[in-house]
Amino acid sequence: MTLRIAPSILSADFGRLAEDIARVERGGADLLHIDVMDGRFVPNITVGVPIVRALHRVAKVPLDVHLMILEPERHIEAFADAGASMMSVHVEVSPHLHRTLEAIKALGAQAGAVLNPSTPAAMLGPVAHLVDFVLVMSVNPGFSGQAYIPESASKVRAVRDLLDEAGSNAPVEIDGGIQPGNAAEVVAAGAEILVAASAIYGTDDPTAATLQLRDAALAGTPTALRESR
């Protein structure tokens, strides 16, 4: 298992993004998670291609771009050109999911499928062999600071089982209400990439918060679990 921490800029200070990115990088962030929202698929509007391009100029870690938008296939080339290393699209809005995932991969980015809380893991079945990662939403998407949905660990486990059965080692990512108190639980269930917004940027010290989240998550890794028995 390779644990990765992906701070989300959704809760960062947009007046000093470069500084806020540097803070989490000093804390050992592995990725930078960017939530792109269109105000249609989710009830919020956030950032677009110009912000991703600007972040790519200053970030030292890969950009993990989560497209919470309708018709994502129309925009993936622009986000790839802007510097996205990873792009994820929602199962709920992608009627031609195979085609969209393949198009993302053809652009040189890792392709991920996203499941909303009410979307069952079984929906991934037809593309389990194709995804580079799967993002499990542990809140209903749209806003940071929401409470973690307790059933999400079971969802992560179901997704991990489905991927294993398909012979895929694609990692499971989780986003929504993740903080030190539940990090070990979701990692023990099979999550390898943890996205956190307010748990990191809602603190006085995002560097320390990034380190703290990793330390908490490591308690759920297989080695830690074996050593605790």
Image (cartoon, grey):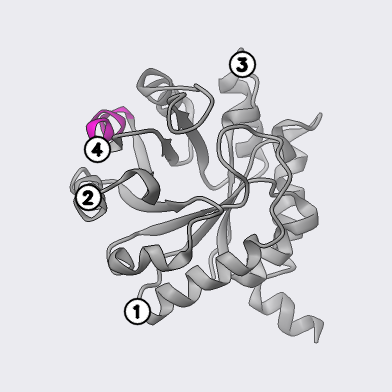
Q: Secondary structure at mark 1?
A: loop
The vertical placement of 61 against 222, above or below, is above
Depth check: 22 or 222 in front? 222
Q: Is residue 10 magenta?
A: no
Residue 132, horizontal then vertical, whole percent: 35, 59
Q: Secondary structure at mark 2?
A: loop
Determine which residue is flagged by label 2: 96
Left or right: residue 120 versus residue 229 is: left
What amino acid is labelled 4 in the image?
Answer: Glu
Determine which residue is flagged by label 1: 167
As drawn, which residue projects farthest toward the bottom? 229
Residue 161, horizontal then vertical, whole percent: 48, 77
What amino acid is labelled 3 in the image?
Answer: Arg
Determine which residue is flagged by label 3: 16
Q: Splitting the image into 4 quarters, where does residue 145 fall?
A: top right
Depth check: 26 or 53 in front? 53
Q: Which residues are magenta?
A: 73-82
The residue positioned 36% from the left and 42% from the top of the image is 85
Q: CA distance from mark 4 to mark 3?
A: 30 Å
Q: Secondary structure at mark 4?
A: helix
Depth check: 178 or 139 in front? 139
Q: Splitting the image into 4 quarters, where does residue 224 fall?
A: bottom right
Left or right: residue 103 versus residue 136 is: left
Residue 191, horizontal then vertical, whole percent: 57, 63
Q: Are marks 4 and 1 in contact (CB under 8 Å)?
A: no
Which mark sits nearer the N-terminus, 2 or 3? 3
